[in-house]
Amino acid sequence: MRKKGIFIFFLLFKFSLFSQTIEENKIYQIYQVPNLSAEDLFTEIHFALSLLYQDSDDVIKYINENTKKIVVKAQALVPVLDAYKLMNPNETVLTDYVDYSHNYTVIIQVKDERYRIELIYQNGKYIDPNLTEYKLPFSARMDFEAKDLEEILQKARIEMSQDIYLMTSRKKKEIYIQSQPKVVKEYQQTLIDYATIFFQSLYKQLYDDINQKEW
């Protein structure tokens, strides 16, 4: 785990000069790859994706050599801080984090010496061992604002006012309600980190392949 953390930090540091743009559930970057034509760069990206994904034929849903566009559809497991565990810290059946599955789409557009990569998240959901599906109480956004957090707090207040929580102490209810901003802020950062690591892993794969020594 420590080695993985060091590797992620290295990637984030090495490629931190690339700026990102975030719009709700979308995040994109433009990467410069000098001295490569659109045709060659498109081929290299296709090759890199084939290495990054175990079943690349299943996830690459669209590829057009004429328009130089690639569309990938896959799924990510995103750990989300469990507010119920914060409310009930001694409850052993609960875990600190719950992995919510998020379908996502990656759109790559290629031009001479550069490419644009965009990742779009769908809202998260979790299916428990009894096959009951739960949806996150907030959307898969990466740019929550103060007004959004207030709406989420209000939803939490309404939830805690339901009859199912009649026997829950006021203190526990307040812990749950006040934990929502922390949960949301950590969640949106996790979405950003996942996309960032994916973008940089693709770029590193390109970099390594382009600079591969003759053998």
Image (tube, helix red, strand yellow):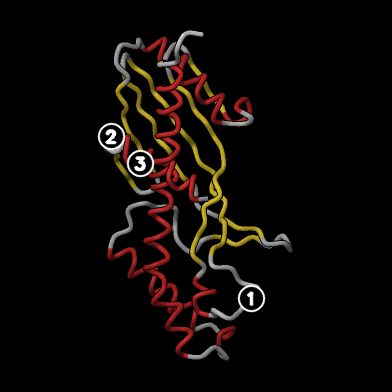
**Looking at the rendered structure, which numbered label has been put on residue 18?**
2
Please report whichever mark, 2 or 1, sits nearer to the chain's N-terminal start.
2
Check the image and report above or below for 150 versus 47.
below
Q: Report the Cα–Cα distance between label 2 and label 3.
A: 10 Å
CB under 8 Å between discs 3 and 1: no
For the point 33% across and 58% down, which residue is it?
144
To which residue does mark 1 refer? 92
Question: What secondary structure is marked by label 3?
Answer: helix
Residue hosting label 3: 12
Front residue of 184 and 190: 190
- Residue placed most toward the observer, 149 or 185: 185
The nearer-to-camera label among 2 and 3 is 3
What's under tag 1, amino acid-wise?
Answer: Thr
Label 1 crowd bin: few (<14), some (14–19), many (20+), radius 10 Å: few
Disc 3 versus disc 1: distance between alpha carbons?
A: 35 Å
- What residue is drawn where x is 41% and y is 73%? 179
Mark 2 element type: loop
Q: Do the CB atoms of the residues marked 2 and 1 lie less than 8 Å apart? A: no
Residue 200, given in percent of the width and then of the height, sits at 40, 34
Q: Quadrant of residue 181?
A: bottom left
Q: Position of residue 90 (x, y in %)?
A: 58, 81
Relative image position of residue 17 (x, y in whole percent)? 25, 35
